[in-house]
Amino acid sequence: MALKEFEDSDAGFYIELCSSLDVGRAFRFGGMSISPPARTSAVWDGVLCHLVAVGVDSRRRLGVVSLTSADLRNGTAYLSAISDQDVLGSGLMVEAVALALHYSFETWPWRKIYLEVPDYNLDAFRSGLDRFFVSEGTLRQHVYLDGRYWDVHVLAISRDRWTSDGRPFLQRLQPT
Protein backbone atom coordinates (compact mmCIF):
# COMPACT_ATOMS: atom_id res chain seq x y z
CA MET A 1 0.00 0.00 0.00
CA ALA A 2 1.21 3.49 -0.85
CA LEU A 3 -0.17 7.00 -0.94
CA LYS A 4 -0.32 9.17 -4.02
CA GLU A 5 -1.23 12.77 -4.65
CA PHE A 6 -4.94 13.37 -5.15
CA GLU A 7 -5.52 14.41 -8.77
CA ASP A 8 -8.55 15.73 -10.61
CA SER A 9 -9.17 12.22 -11.93
CA ASP A 10 -9.55 10.97 -8.32
CA ALA A 11 -12.48 13.27 -7.53
CA GLY A 12 -15.03 10.93 -9.09
CA PHE A 13 -13.64 7.98 -7.11
CA TYR A 14 -13.88 10.00 -3.88
CA ILE A 15 -17.46 11.16 -4.59
CA GLU A 16 -18.41 7.57 -5.43
CA LEU A 17 -17.01 6.32 -2.10
CA CYS A 18 -18.60 9.14 -0.11
CA SER A 19 -22.04 8.68 -1.64
CA SER A 20 -22.07 4.87 -1.88
CA LEU A 21 -24.86 2.98 -0.17
CA ASP A 22 -22.48 0.85 1.89
CA VAL A 23 -19.49 2.83 3.25
CA GLY A 24 -20.54 6.30 2.09
CA ARG A 25 -23.73 6.52 4.09
CA ALA A 26 -21.64 6.31 7.26
CA PHE A 27 -19.15 8.94 6.11
CA ARG A 28 -18.90 12.61 5.21
CA PHE A 29 -22.07 13.07 3.15
CA GLY A 30 -24.20 10.66 5.19
CA GLY A 31 -25.64 8.92 2.14
CA MET A 32 -26.55 12.09 0.23
CA SER A 33 -26.07 12.24 -3.51
CA ILE A 34 -23.90 15.13 -4.59
CA SER A 35 -25.14 17.06 -7.61
CA PRO A 36 -22.64 17.56 -10.45
CA PRO A 37 -22.48 21.36 -9.91
CA ALA A 38 -21.74 20.88 -6.19
CA ARG A 39 -19.05 18.21 -6.60
CA THR A 40 -15.97 20.45 -6.62
CA SER A 41 -16.91 22.23 -3.42
CA ALA A 42 -18.03 18.93 -1.85
CA VAL A 43 -14.61 17.42 -2.55
CA TRP A 44 -12.54 20.40 -1.42
CA ASP A 45 -14.42 22.48 1.20
CA GLY A 46 -12.40 22.47 4.42
CA VAL A 47 -9.77 20.10 3.02
CA LEU A 48 -6.05 20.80 3.40
CA CYS A 49 -5.07 17.68 1.46
CA HIS A 50 -6.40 14.38 0.18
CA LEU A 51 -4.09 11.40 -0.27
CA VAL A 52 -5.15 8.40 -2.32
CA ALA A 53 -4.32 4.94 -0.96
CA VAL A 54 -3.25 2.65 -3.81
CA GLY A 55 -2.08 -0.92 -4.09
CA VAL A 56 1.69 -1.05 -4.56
CA ASP A 57 1.61 -3.56 -7.41
CA SER A 58 -1.86 -3.03 -8.81
CA ARG A 59 -1.93 0.78 -8.43
CA ARG A 60 -5.66 0.22 -7.82
CA ARG A 61 -7.27 2.96 -5.73
CA LEU A 62 -8.25 1.56 -2.35
CA GLY A 63 -9.40 4.65 -0.50
CA VAL A 64 -8.75 8.27 0.41
CA VAL A 65 -7.23 9.77 3.55
CA SER A 66 -8.02 13.45 4.12
CA LEU A 67 -6.63 16.16 6.35
CA THR A 68 -9.31 18.73 7.12
CA SER A 69 -10.22 21.62 9.40
CA ALA A 70 -6.63 22.81 9.65
CA ASP A 71 -6.06 25.24 12.50
CA LEU A 72 -2.54 26.48 11.82
CA ARG A 73 -2.66 29.00 14.66
CA ASN A 74 -3.27 26.31 17.28
CA GLY A 75 -1.50 23.45 15.51
CA THR A 76 -4.41 21.07 15.04
CA ALA A 77 -6.18 19.32 12.17
CA TYR A 78 -8.57 16.42 11.60
CA LEU A 79 -7.86 13.23 9.71
CA SER A 80 -10.45 10.98 8.08
CA ALA A 81 -10.28 7.92 5.86
CA ILE A 82 -12.68 6.10 3.60
CA SER A 83 -12.11 2.97 1.54
CA ASP A 84 -13.78 0.59 -0.84
CA GLN A 85 -16.04 -1.93 0.91
CA ASP A 86 -13.72 -4.81 -0.07
CA VAL A 87 -10.76 -3.17 1.73
CA LEU A 88 -12.55 -2.94 5.10
CA GLY A 89 -10.96 -5.18 7.72
CA SER A 90 -7.86 -5.89 5.62
CA GLY A 91 -5.54 -3.58 7.57
CA LEU A 92 -4.62 -1.67 4.42
CA MET A 93 -6.31 1.52 5.58
CA VAL A 94 -4.49 1.28 8.92
CA GLU A 95 -1.30 1.51 6.90
CA ALA A 96 -2.75 4.37 4.83
CA VAL A 97 -3.66 6.30 7.99
CA ALA A 98 -0.17 5.71 9.44
CA LEU A 99 1.44 6.96 6.21
CA ALA A 100 -0.85 9.99 6.17
CA LEU A 101 -0.06 10.79 9.80
CA HIS A 102 3.65 10.56 9.02
CA TYR A 103 3.26 12.83 6.00
CA SER A 104 1.17 15.29 8.00
CA PHE A 105 3.54 15.55 10.97
CA GLU A 106 6.54 15.87 8.62
CA THR A 107 4.88 18.56 6.50
CA TRP A 108 3.08 20.80 9.00
CA PRO A 109 3.80 21.85 12.60
CA TRP A 110 0.80 20.04 14.13
CA ARG A 111 0.62 19.57 17.88
CA LYS A 112 -2.29 17.16 17.52
CA ILE A 113 -4.32 15.49 14.83
CA TYR A 114 -7.89 14.57 15.71
CA LEU A 115 -10.16 11.80 14.46
CA GLU A 116 -13.90 11.67 15.09
CA VAL A 117 -14.87 8.01 15.30
CA PRO A 118 -18.47 6.85 15.68
CA ASP A 119 -19.15 3.81 17.87
CA TYR A 120 -19.89 1.67 14.82
CA ASN A 121 -16.28 2.25 13.60
CA LEU A 122 -14.50 2.23 16.96
CA ASP A 123 -13.41 -1.42 16.71
CA ALA A 124 -11.14 -0.46 13.82
CA PHE A 125 -9.25 1.84 16.23
CA ARG A 126 -9.31 -0.23 19.44
CA SER A 127 -5.79 -1.60 19.05
CA GLY A 128 -4.48 1.97 18.74
CA LEU A 129 -6.42 3.44 21.68
CA ASP A 130 -4.07 4.55 24.44
CA ARG A 131 -1.17 3.25 22.35
CA PHE A 132 -1.35 5.94 19.67
CA PHE A 133 -4.67 7.70 20.12
CA VAL A 134 -5.98 9.26 23.30
CA SER A 135 -9.69 9.81 23.81
CA GLU A 136 -10.35 13.50 24.40
CA GLY A 137 -14.11 13.31 24.63
CA THR A 138 -17.34 11.75 23.51
CA LEU A 139 -20.20 13.41 21.69
CA ARG A 140 -23.19 11.46 22.99
CA GLN A 141 -25.76 10.23 20.47
CA HIS A 142 -24.23 12.47 17.84
CA VAL A 143 -24.77 10.69 14.51
CA TYR A 144 -27.76 8.81 13.12
CA LEU A 145 -27.31 5.55 11.21
CA ASP A 146 -29.23 2.30 10.91
CA GLY A 147 -32.22 3.56 12.87
CA ARG A 148 -30.35 4.82 15.92
CA TYR A 149 -28.07 7.53 17.25
CA TRP A 150 -24.42 6.68 17.92
CA ASP A 151 -21.78 8.26 20.14
CA VAL A 152 -18.79 9.85 18.40
CA HIS A 153 -15.40 9.58 20.08
CA VAL A 154 -12.90 12.39 19.61
CA LEU A 155 -9.47 10.75 19.43
CA ALA A 156 -6.18 12.60 19.19
CA ILE A 157 -2.60 11.73 18.38
CA SER A 158 0.05 14.23 19.42
CA ARG A 159 3.30 14.93 17.64
CA ASP A 160 5.18 13.49 20.64
CA ARG A 161 3.13 10.28 20.59
CA TRP A 162 3.61 9.95 16.84
CA THR A 163 7.37 10.42 17.20
CA SER A 164 7.72 7.92 20.05
CA ASP A 165 5.23 5.24 18.95
CA GLY A 166 3.86 5.97 15.49
CA ARG A 167 7.06 6.17 13.50
CA PRO A 168 8.39 2.81 14.82
CA PHE A 169 4.97 1.26 14.07
CA LEU A 170 5.10 2.58 10.51
CA GLN A 171 8.66 1.25 10.07
CA ARG A 172 7.46 -2.21 11.13
CA LEU A 173 4.61 -1.99 8.61
CA GLN A 174 6.94 -1.03 5.78
CA PRO A 175 10.30 -2.76 6.21
CA THR A 176 13.06 -1.50 3.91
Image: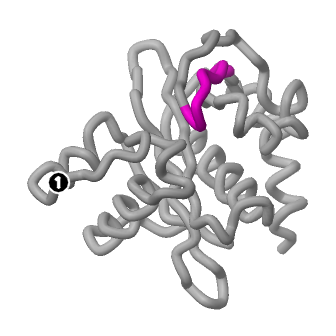
Q: Is residue 84 magenta?
A: no
In the rendered image, residue 169, in percent from the top left (x then y), is placed at 86, 50
Residue beneath the point at 78% across and 28% down: 133
154 sits to left or right of 169? left
Q: Residue furthest front?
A: 147
| Quadrant of the image containing the N terminus | bottom right
In the image, 168: left or right of 39? Answer: right
What colouring method underlies this structural image?
Answer: one colour
SS for dot 1: loop
Foreground of the two, 10 or 49: 10
Question: Which residue is rendered at x = 39% and y = 61% of the image?
Answer: 14
- In the rendering, at what x and y percent does residue 92 appear? 73, 64
Q: Is residue 29 above or below residue 143?
A: below
Left or right relative to 63: residue 38:
left
Q: Which residues are magenta?
A: 145-153
Mark 1: amino acid: Ser
Relative horizontal placement of residue 29, taking residue 104 as reference (left or right): left
Nearer to the camera, 81 or 148: 148
Report the front residue among 23 and 112. 23
Q: Is residue 99 placed above or below 4 in the rendered structure? A: above
Question: Magenta part mainly helix, strand or loop?
Answer: strand
Find disc 1 in the rendering and name its residue: 35
Who's the residue at 55% across and 57% down the image?
A: 22
> Considering the image in quadrants, where does the C terminus appear?
bottom right
**Residue 111 image point, x, y percent:** 60, 21
**Residue 40 in picture, x, y percent from top left:** 19, 53
As rendered, which of 118 and 92 lies closer to the eye?
118
Any magenta on residue 151? yes
Q: Residues within 10 Å of mark 1 (few under 14, many from 20)?
A: few
Above/below status of 39 relative to 175: above
Number of numbered discs visible in the structure rendering: 1
